[in-house]
């Protein structure tokens, strides 16, 4: 009897173990390039106003770029094609007509990691209404998934941030493709060479009083970045330096980074008399404990090439910052 009981327990244990392994095995690893979005929708819906509303929101231009580049590169497929390998895409928007109006966000439904947004409605008008009402929520869900994926790839090989930790009391996950170009007291200039230009970061601190809240915020951010550029980022012509482009009004918004209130500013920089320019993304992180703002800025110089992915890489890096 004891042997029989033992065999039963062993069988049950083996059965549960296999079930657990099978459960893990049926959720495959997701695939897809960063910011590539799959839209699952009937062809007729994609070609009419439903598709137009999707494109207007998810293919809208990224703020702060000189040339229009969409936030997401979208590919559409009808529902009958959405099977097998195609379900492994990391970000998926699924449109379901003939069901109650609703917008649902699911994680790791068919692959891991994956964000699946399902928008439904009985009619085209209901679907469009759902897309428009939930536009920010939908964009935020996809953007957060892509930030996480970009950061996951970065973690494979990290830059040594010891100097930043010791001098500014912060840590940040930067790929080893970057190098320290300047470490001047509390100012750090970090660079990555690319085929046709460079992707750079500046990290420094300023007193809390340096940035006023309200209508003057954007002017203070621009004044600070221009003064820092004049001191630290010289241009190729004597007396030239990196500054904010006058003809382009920066976009400023409020966000949260490292659980702290943060001003996010996007715009264009240039170097006077040097025909050099590009986009920048600037974060002013309020660190009340230390009576300062931590300023982390990334900017791109890449003439004649698309810059969306470079700016997104910088955004993902900056979002990994943690103040000690």
Image (cartoon, helix red, strand yellow):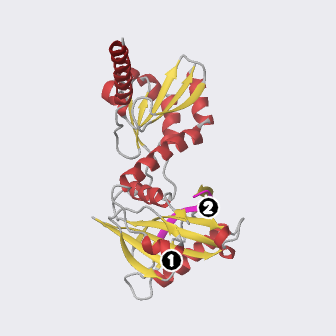
Reply above or below: 13 against 235. above
Query: Secondary structure beneath disc 1?
Result: helix
Range of residues picked out in magenta? 258-269
Relative horizontal placement of residue 311, taking residue 3 as reference (left or right): right
Seen from this angle, which residue lies furthest front?
2
Reply above or below: 115 against 48. below
Where residue 157 appears, x then y in whole percent? 33, 59
Point 70% across, 70% down: residue: 212
Where residue 220 appears, x then y in whole percent? 64, 73
Real-space CA distance between mark 1 and mark 2, rounded to the nearest whole angstrom = 21 Å
Point 42% across, 53% down: residue: 151
For residue 7, the mark is none
Seen from this angle, which residue lies furthest right?
214
Assign the C terminus to one quadrant of the image. Answer: bottom right
Q: Which residue is mark 2?
A: 262
Using a 10 Å C-alpha cutoff, classify the residue at mark 2 as few (fewer than 14 neighbours), some (14 to 19) or many (20 or more). many
Where residue 289 appears, x then y in whole percent? 66, 69
Q: Which residue is mark 1?
A: 167
Where residue 202 appears, x then y in whole percent? 47, 72
Reply above or below: 273 against 49. below
Q: Is residue 261 magenta?
A: yes
Assign the N terminus to one quadrant of the image. Answer: top left
Q: Is residue 311 magenta?
A: no
Reading the chain from its start, which is encountered first: label 1 or label 2?
Answer: 1
Seen from this angle, which residue lies furthest left?
195
Using a 10 Å C-alpha cutoff, classify the residue at mark 1 as few (fewer than 14 neighbours), some (14 to 19) or many (20 or more). some
């Amino acid at each position: 009897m004891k042997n029989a009981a033992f065999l039963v327990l062993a069988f049950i244990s083996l059965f549960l173990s296999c079930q657990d392994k099978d459960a893990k095995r049926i959720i495959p690893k997701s695939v897809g390039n960063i910011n590539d979005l799959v839209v699952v929708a009937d062809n007729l819906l994609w070609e009419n106003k439903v598709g137009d509303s999707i494109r207007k929101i998810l293919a809208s231009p990224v703020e702060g770029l000189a040339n229009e580049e969409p936030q997401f590169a979208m590919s559409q497929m009808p529902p009958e094609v959405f099977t097998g390998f195609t379900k492994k895409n990391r970000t998926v928007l699924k449109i379901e007509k003939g069901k109650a109006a609703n917008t649902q966000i699911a994680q790791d439904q068919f692959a891991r990691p994956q964000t699946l947004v399902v928008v439904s409605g009985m009619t085209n008008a209901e679907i469009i209404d759902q897309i428009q009402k939930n536009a920010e929520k939908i964009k935020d869900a996809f953007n957060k998934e892509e930030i996480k994926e970009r950061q996951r790839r970065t973690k494979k090989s990290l830059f040594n941030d010891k100097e930043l930790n010791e001098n500014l009391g912060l840590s940040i996950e930067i790929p080893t493709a970057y190098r320290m170009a300047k470490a001047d007291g509390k100012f750090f200039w970090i660079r990555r060479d690319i085929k046709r230009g460079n992707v750079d970061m500046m990290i420094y601190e300023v007193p809390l009083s340096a940035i006023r809240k309200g209508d003057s915020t954007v002017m203070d951010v621009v004044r600070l970045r221009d003064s820092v550029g004049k001191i630290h980022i010289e241009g190729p012509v004597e007396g030239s330096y990196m500054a904010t482009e006058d003809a382009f009004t920066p976009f400023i918004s409020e966000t949260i980074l490292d659980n702290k209130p943060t001003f996010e500013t996007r715009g264009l920089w240039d170097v006077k008399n040097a025909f050099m320019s590009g986009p920048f993304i600037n974060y002013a992180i309020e660190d009340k404990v230390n009576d300062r703002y931590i300023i982390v800025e990334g900017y791109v110089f890449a003439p004649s090439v698309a810059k969306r992915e470079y700016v997104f890489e910088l955004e993902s890096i900056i979002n990994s910052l943690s103040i000690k």
